[in-house]
Amino acid sequence: MKFFKNILTIFSSKKNEIKEISLKISPALEEFVRSEMLPGLSITENYFWSSFENLLNKFQQRNKDLLDMRKRLQAKINGWHLARKDKDINIGEYKDFLEDIGYLHPRSKDFSIRTWNVDPEIRKIAGPQLVVPVMNARFALNAANARWGSLYDALYGTDIINDEDGAHREGGYNPARGEKVIAFAKKFLDETIPLEKGSYSEVLKFQFIDSELLMTLKDGSKINLQNKDQYIGYKDDGEGAYGLLFKNNNLHFEIQIDRSHPIGQEDLAGIKDILMESAITTIQDCEDSVAAVDAEDKIIVYRNWLGLMKGNLKRSFDKGGKFITRELNPDRKYLLKNGKMILLPGRSLMLVRNVGHLMTNPAIRDRKGNEVPEGIMDAFFTVCIAIHDIIGNGVYKNSKTKSIYIVKPKMHGPEEVKFTCDLFSEVERIFNLPENTVKLGIMDEERRTTVNLKECIEIAKQRVIFINTGFLDRTGDEIHTSMEAGPMVTKAEMKNQDWIKAYENWNVDIGLETGFRGNAQIGKGMWPMPDEMLDMYNTKTMHPKAGANCAWVPSPTAAIIHAIHYHQINVQDEQEKISKREKADLDDLLKIPFMKKNQLPSQEEINAELENNAQGILGYVVRWVDQGIGCSKVPDINNIGLMEDRATCRISSQHISNWLHHGLCSEVDVVETMKKMAKVVDAQNKNDVNYRKMAPSFDGIAFKAACELAIKGKYQPSGYTEPILHEMRLRRK
């Protein structure tokens, strides 16, 4: 209550202060702030906008200076490689050079992070993490609600369960498939909460005797769990239906009993489903998965974030002839063994990903008419909106510790992390928030951040709650940084390079070394194939085994499947083992993945790589530019649906640009390949009524954008796709 009063006091004291504002603000954005965002915060419009202008005055030039630093460092690196063309790189000499120019920082001494007031979803619970475009309200709600999901549905609707022996998915409910689902689920129970003897396939009923949960088997014996502490509590659903709550590795799941349900009727124990705690955290994304290029788009982004923070975001839609309204799920109430009630969160803990430092947005212009840095804008708006959650204006609580979680992408090195921390501090001061209320997730996806990761974390040691690895963006920057070193290996071969193996281990090593265990998230990247759940189930154990206590998944269904891995693997135990291994080597991390002259590909191999890259760029860009879709399932060259965002576009465009620069292909080759693949993409999208064909004219804005991304990729800042995509989308709008 004191905190709430402090906020009201500072804002009330500013009510009568009228300051002249020279900003040029979109009328629609101004109206959104006035009528939707500020009510309930006791913040006047004048204080809001004058504070934002002051923030710009403090940070706008500094933002530009950091971008200029990127250019200077890149120019020096280009020059170094050009001076040593066709020579082997001496890693010691290379490191000395990087240190001399300030690319590599002096190594930090040992320290531990000291971030306070962090929710248990980040500190203690290992589990799946969703990343979702906040611009799409339906997707945003689905992701937030993916904290709990049906295991039976996830198994039945995916290739986890094979179609053999008549167990097909088509049509209505298939009992043969249902039997396989139930067998899989009961095997999960046997492995996760084992009985003293026997199997859950033998359980006839659950009952309470002397306050203990006992299971009766077919042979009449009454048995307990091997570990009685795994049973947590009970939920009465009425009319004889109930749920039994269990906990393993800090994750919950609920066995749902209902003998009147069609599935429960056929089950020996009356089990109708297993409800899994799944997406523990969700990143509501303002960046790579959205196409927000102007005031209209940014209002949608901020409005949806506001709705999530206040708990009143809703979307209604037609699904199979039935009108459905989606809204945030309530918390779940259980009766504990000791007779007390407990509330478990019904929703993922939500983080918000701001944009990086590069882009500006025409929604607001400064006194000189310049577009303002979008990253500064995001910090100010998303924090202000989240205050609704902190002071209790919402239907539900997101952060029970009164923290605001911002994931910051595409930072290049410690200076940019310092800028972000200083920016957050100033925003906290403006809104009278306690110091370090705003927590920072550092995305380790740029080369200069990777090689200085410990130094980046040290700067943010009182804010940091998250680090992760991201193969696609990180590879895009790897290619761009060393563009002059030589032609890079193929994308497929890139995954086998020394640098990327070191990168994945380095991130975990540094996280554990700086005290992340039990305090913060170490994340791993996205599973890109939402329809390939069996492959994910068989392979994504590698992420918790690698010491990651969260890993990205492409859908709520994937979150349910991936949650099984965190029951199978205790991540904190894995982290303890990993902390004792030999650490990743900086020398390996700095090995550049370029081909030697005797490794150059054949013409056939060049053509295949170009086609693969071109098809991926086109499939993504045509939706981005023409429809404003920032993330979608895009068929690859083999018609396998991949979740694509700007990161996938970045690596493909940089790869073509690199080969073009080094003469493995010509500009004519690139354009002709684009035309060939445009016909393929057109065919893949023939059933999309909103799709605009690229062939045979090849004169559309989307096609032009795709070509420019590849041909001009070498000249784009850090190899980013945003400048071209934003320009073309604005033209299209």
Image (cartoon, rainbow, N blue to C red):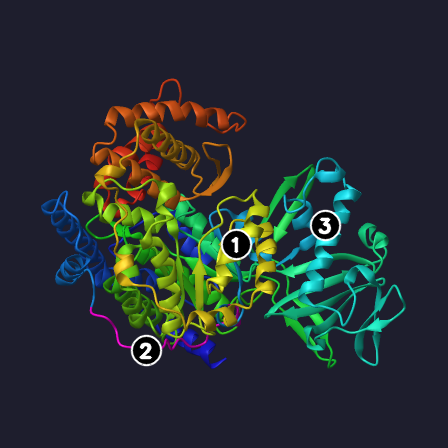
Region of the chain picked out in magenta, as a range: 106-121
Three-letter amino acid code at the position of disc 2: Phe
Q: Which residue is mark 3?
A: 181
Three-letter amino acid code at the position of disc 1: Lys
Q: Is residue 116 rendered magenta in the image?
A: yes
- For residue 84, side relative to residue 592 (left or right): left
Q: Is residue 698 rendered magenta in the image?
A: no
Three-letter amino acid code at the position of disc 3: Val
Q: Nearer the viewer, residue 645 or 308?
A: 645
Q: Nearer the viewer, mark 2 or mark 1?
A: 1
Q: Secondary structure at mark 1?
A: loop
- For residue 290, side relative to residue 362 (left or right): right
Labels in figure, total:
3
Q: Nearer the viewer, residue 669 or 197?
A: 197
Q: Residues within 10 Å of mark 3 (few under 14, many from 20)?
A: many
Residues tagged 3 and 2 counted as in contact (Cβ below 8 A): no
The secondary structure that dominates the magenta segment is loop
Q: Residue furthest top?
A: 696
Task: Answer with the quarter of the image where residue 522 lies.
Answer: bottom left
Q: Which residue is mark 1?
A: 540
Q: Which residue is mark 2?
A: 111
Residue 296 position in % (x across, y down) = 40, 44
Dot placed on the residue nearer the N-terminal end, 2 or 1:
2
